[in-house]
Amino acid sequence: MNFSSLQEYFYKLSNRCYLLVLLPLGLFIYLFQQLMTRQIEPIVQDEPLVNIIIVTLCVFGLVNLTTVHGVSVQRLKKYAAELGLGRKLDRYHEIVLFRIAASSASSLMMAAGFLLTGSEVFGIFFIGILLWTLLQWPTSKRACQDLQLKGDEYDMVLYKKDKF
């Protein structure tokens, strides 16, 4: 990612993350409004099949988030050992987008489940995924923790300074 200052870096990173989160959020709100006003009906009405869909999609969503979290923690440990703040921040950008995209994919699974079944369980899981995404949100403090920055690099990133 090209950036001329740390403020611009976090601004661009946050904007990309907002786009990844707002797509499933907008879709879920639209589906919720359509289902609640009965303009569309749930596709699956059979109760045993609804339960199977609920369990399957929720398990897939949780496995997706857990796997991505484990992979990102391993990669962050590896990237924290690299030299150069610019290189670390470029790698951090990849990890953050990977995390947020995985959250968006899980959110889209919950939206699909809601469309299929109309079950409010998917709404609860959707909100849980949004809260999880909020906890993973890229801030300067979070970047310092994730990349294990110390000394001057820590001060630069935390306070978004351009020079030591």
Image: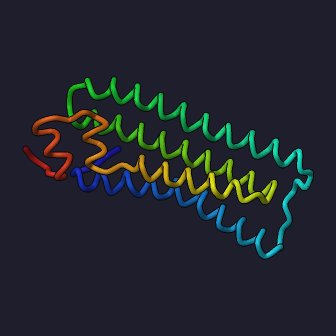
Compared across the picture, whether 54 is left or right of 20 comes to right
| Residue 59 in which image quadrant | top right
Task: Tell me what residue is drawn at x 74 percent, y 41 percent.
Answer: 55
> Residue at the spot x=20%, y=48% of the render?
158
Along the horizontal axis of the image, is 66 left or right of 47? left
| 119, above or below 155, in the image | below
> Looking at the picture, how far across and down is residue 163, in whole percent?
9, 47
Q: Residue furthest bottom?
A: 37
Q: Position of residue 146 (x, y in %)?
A: 31, 37
Q: Is residue 61 left or right of residue 74?
A: right
In-front residue for pair 156/74: 74
Look at 7% across and 44% down and name the residue there: 164
Residue extending farthest to the right is 46
Q: Position of residue 37 (x, y in %)?
A: 78, 76
* Residue 90 image position (x, y, % from top left): 33, 38
Residue at 56%, 52% (x, y): give it.
128
Q: How is the image coloured?
A: rainbow
Q: Is residue 11 above or below residue 64?
A: below
